[in-house]
Image (cartoon, helix red, strand yellow):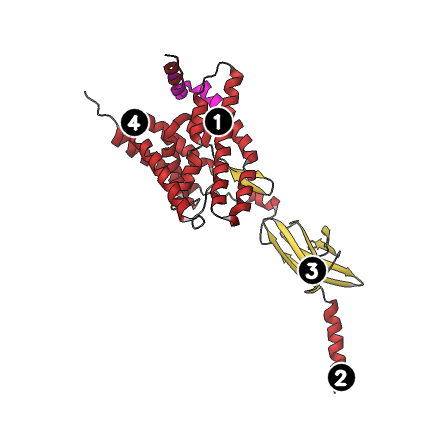
């Protein structure tokens, strides 16, 4: 029984050792990916492929010695495939949280026009009152 | 350019507030009714300038336009900038009420240099153009320096931020210099009477 347990443990450990973890996030239109086998073992110089729904390559990246790579978001939604050689591969579907540069162009303006107009109205009111209090009396 | 609340030491906040309050109250006291419309327009200009962002490398900075406000208002720039900063703080959270004094000091005091430059006598077109460029350039450079100095005086932890603040505004100094030059040339062309205080000053000096 013990031998069966030990054998199972070794097999699972071996699977863990080759499991590729993929961590990705995006910020202000830029994608950041980190790939690693274990905490102390980054996926160095691994190929990252960003694929669209038709499995067409949008972008190909290579991780650095820390297992990290970054690039501008190529689309709002895509798959990330990391290849570590020897048939080791991991894939995940990614939905961007920030907007790509192309999308950002079509977004409605986030300029707070209501507050800007309120500020201008307050300036007019403030200086209007100031003028009214400071104006010299006009003698007819 | 706007220092946020909860960042600075109390002695810096109080010092900035006292000096700014003195200049602002004096400016209010000596403000003439005929100068109020121009002060209001330039206050609105200063208020709006903060929403015009200029991308520089990975970051972006916003226009200040303190030089032109100072050139056209002199000491009254304190009133225009005070009102604009107050509204920017209350409506948009740029800066804040406790930092209003030090922000006003950092932004309004250098505009007096703009006024002094504007009043310098010029005889040739190119001299005027250089001065008008400097009216935009120098006050912003001084404001960036005062901002960096404020951060540096706040403690060693802010030294890096102080250096970044100074360097980040360097390209903007040239942009504001060019914009001020173009704006003053435009005013000179379409409404030269707005620049009347210079003629008055020069004729007084000549007399």
Q: Which residues are magenta?
A: B179-200
Secondary structure type for disc 4: helix
Q: Which residue in the protein does label 2 denote?
A: A4
Q: Which residue in the protein does label 1 denote?
A: B135
Quadrant in the picture for residue B166: top right
Residue at (45%, 49%) from the top-left corner? B7
Q: Position of residue A36 (x, y in %)?
A: 70, 62
Q: Position of residue B40 (x, y in %)?
A: 36, 31
Mark positioned earlier in the residue sequence (2 or 3): 2
Secondary structure type for disc 1: helix
Chain of the residue where label 3 is placed in the rendered structure:
A
Q: Which quadrant is home to the C terminus of chain B? A: top left
Gap between marks 1 and 3 measured at Cα: 53 Å
Was residue B198 drawn as part of the magenta stretch in this picture? yes
Gap between marks 1 and 2 measured at Cα: 84 Å
- Is most of the magenta stretch helix, strand or loop? helix
Q: Which residue in the protein does label 3 denote?
A: A35
Secondary structure type for disc 2: helix
Chain of the residue where label 4 is placed in the rendered structure:
B
Gap between marks 4 and 1 measured at Cα: 26 Å
Mark positioned earlier in the residue sequence (4 or 1): 4
Q: Are marks 3 and 4 on the same chain?
A: no
Q: Is residue B87 visible?
A: no
Gap between marks 4 and 2 measured at Cα: 96 Å
């Amino acid at each position: 029984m013990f031998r069966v347990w030990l054998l199972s443990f070794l097999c699972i450990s071996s699977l863990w050792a080759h499991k590729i973890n993929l961590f990705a996030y995006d910020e202000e239109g830029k994608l950041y990916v980190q790939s690693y086998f274990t905490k102390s073992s980054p996926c160095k110089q691994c190929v990252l492929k960003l694929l669209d729904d038709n499995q067409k390559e949008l972008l190909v990246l290579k991780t650095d010695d820390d297992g990290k790579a970054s690039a501008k978001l190529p689309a709002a939604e895509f798959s990330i495939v990391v290849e570590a050689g020897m048939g080791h591969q991991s894939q995940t579907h990614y939905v961007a949280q920030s907007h790509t540069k192309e999308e950002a162009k079509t977004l409605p303006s986030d300029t707070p026009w209501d507050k800007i107009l309120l500020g201008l109205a307050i300036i007019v009111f403030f200086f209007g009152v100031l003028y009214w209090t400071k104006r010299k009396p006009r003698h007819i | 350019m706007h220092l946020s609340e909860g960042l600075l030491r109390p002695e810096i906040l109080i010092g900035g507030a006292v000096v700014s309050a003195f200049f602002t109250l004096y400016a209010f006291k000596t403000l003439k009714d005929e100068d109020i419309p121009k002060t209001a327009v330039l206050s609105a200009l200063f208020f709006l300038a903060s929403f015009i962002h200029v991308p520089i490398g990975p970051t972006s900075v916003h226009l200040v336009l303190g030089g032109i406000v100072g050139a056209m208002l002199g000491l009254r720039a304190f009133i225009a900038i005070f009102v604009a900063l107050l509204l920017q703080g209350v409506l948009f959270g740029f800066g804040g009420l406790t930092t209003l004094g030090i922000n006003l000091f950092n932004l309004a005091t250098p505009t007096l240099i703009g006024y002094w430059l504007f009043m310098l006598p010029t005889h040739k077109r190119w001299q005027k153009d250089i001065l008008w460029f400097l009216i935009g350039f120098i006050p912003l450079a001084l404001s960036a320096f005062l901002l960096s100095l404020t951060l540096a005086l706040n403690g060693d932890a802010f030294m890096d931020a102080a250096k970044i603040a100074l360097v980040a505004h360097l390209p903007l100094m040239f942009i504001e210099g060019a914009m001020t030059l173009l704006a003053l040339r435009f005013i000179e062309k379409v409404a030269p009477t707005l620049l009347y205080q210079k003629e008055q000053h020069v004729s007084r000096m000549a007399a």
